[in-house]
Amino acid sequence: MSHNAFITETDIAGDESGVLDGRTVAVKDNISTEGVRTTCGSEMLSDYVPPYDATVVSRLKDAGATIVGKANMDEFGMGTTTETSAFGPVTNPVDDDRVPGGSSGGSAAAVAAGDADLALGSDTGGSIRCPAAYCGVVGIKPTYGLVSRYGLVAYANSLEQIGPIANTVADAAELLSVIAGPDENDGTTRKAGADADYASAATGDVEGLTIGVPTQLVGGRERAGDDPAEGGETRAGADEAVVEVFEDALDEYRDAGAEIVEVSLPSVEYAVAAYYVIAMSEASSNLARFDGVRYGTSGGYDGNWNEAFSDAREEGFGDEVKRRVLLGTYALSAGYHDKYYKQAQEARAWVKQDFDEAFETVDVLASPTMPMLPPELGESLDDPLQMYLADANTVPVNLANLPAISVPAGESDGLPVGLQLVGPAFGEETIIRAGSLLA
């Protein structure tokens, strides 16, 4: 195993008669595996061994897959580079001096390096699509409710989904077929899409498909009202090198018979701010259980429970987790709930409305997955705000609970560039069909 992609190596064989017989899978280390420690990339859970399998793990075993390890990740899924793990950073198989993206960086790196045929990640604001783009592989963020979250250690319940990572769209789609479907242990799952054969949708046939390109998510495109002289604000969008590869990929779609049109999603200007208020607020609530008593490292007890609770979290949580828990607690506190959290939820509704309107005229939406090339290791840690802004193209999808896929679009300076395709709710077959043109 390489690139520090795994926290724990395993050899868990499944049912030999399954459709994934002989295929190896890396499982992100926030997905419960019976008898195998599940750390979430944190000192807080460094010795935690779940007594049960997540639903997706049970389905992997039933399908004959062999689980080869628990993949490294940003601590509790909080990061865009897989550098916040308590078990050290993951390096990008394309360039060891670069980050693999996050938070599912270990999953993507394992596939890109050939240490696993397939992988499971979780996507709260782009955590599957980002590392897929940076490592040059395929990642699918399913519609909220298509895949069970039972056994996924919660970061932000209303946003996150488990999804597949693979070298090709067809392989990712095959894995999605295995893990999709309702689960009696997860009341948010739906029957829609449960019986679909996603792998058969990977035809690459885009003849007659209408692809919308949101002007707000691509640099170098004109937008009304952005002239600073008129009081507007400029938005950098994607880097020029990324846009060039993206535009070349759009030409491939045109040549294959797809129609490319521009669309506007004005609400996405507020998506990053809304996303982080909601995600951090939910994280503040979800991570309250890690108190050194029920879960996690113990802070010791000398008669003062509050001090023991504080010591356990001081020792067990890393800086990024502490930052997000504190900000989330602040946003939910008396006097600030309506000012921040309520407004964030209103912005979320606006984002969903914009997507719904766009899908009245287009079949899928396309943008660069990430607005920049993979940063060098250490580059993002000193500026958390820039790390948050890097999620500008991915977080709107989670706010709207829609499906999206990242596929390799090409390279710039030898580094991968991903193209993101977004579909309407439970429109996985459409984005798989479109994505398979490129991979």
Image (cartoon, grey):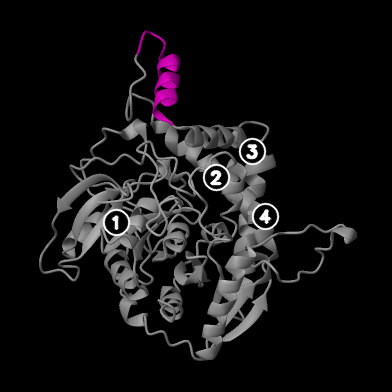
In terms of depth relative to the viewer, which is nearer, 298 or 85? 85
Q: Residues within 10 Å of mark 4 (few under 14, many from 20)?
A: some
Q: Earlier in the sequence, mark 2 or mark 1?
A: 1
Q: Quadrant of residue 215?
A: bottom right
Q: Are marks 3 and 4 in contact (CB under 8 Å)?
A: no
Q: Which residues are magenta?
A: 301-317
Q: Position of residue 398 (x, y in %)?
A: 51, 58
> Relative to 15, does residue 287 appear above or below in the rendering?
above
In terms of depth relative to the viewer, which is nearer, 9 or 359? 9
**Rounded to the nearest whole Å, what is the CA distance between mark 2 and mark 4?**
22 Å
Q: Looking at the figure, which quarter contains the C terminus?
A: bottom left
| Image disc number at residue 431 | none
> Relative to 134, does residue 366 appear above or below in the rendering?
below
Q: Are marks 2 and 1 in contact (CB under 8 Å)?
A: no
Which residue, given by chain and number where applicable, does mark 1 sit on? Answer: 184
For image coordinates 45% across by 32% down, the residue present is 318
Q: Earlier in the sequence, mark 1 or mark 4?
A: 1
For image coordinates 42% across by 73% down, the residue present is 428
Label 2 vs label 4, nearer the camera:
2
Which residue, given by chain and number where applicable, does mark 3 sit on? Answer: 337
Q: Earlier in the sequence, mark 3 or mark 2?
A: 3
| Image disc number at residue 380 | 2
Work out whether residue 196 can be spotted.
no
Q: Amino acid at mark 2?
A: Ser
Q: Secondary structure at mark 4?
A: helix
Q: Amino acid at mark 3?
A: His
Q: Amino acid at mark 1?
A: Glu
Q: Are marks 2 and 4 in contact (CB under 8 Å)?
A: no
**Rounded to the nearest whole Å, what is the CA distance between mark 3 and mark 1?**
33 Å
| Image disc number at residue 270 | 4
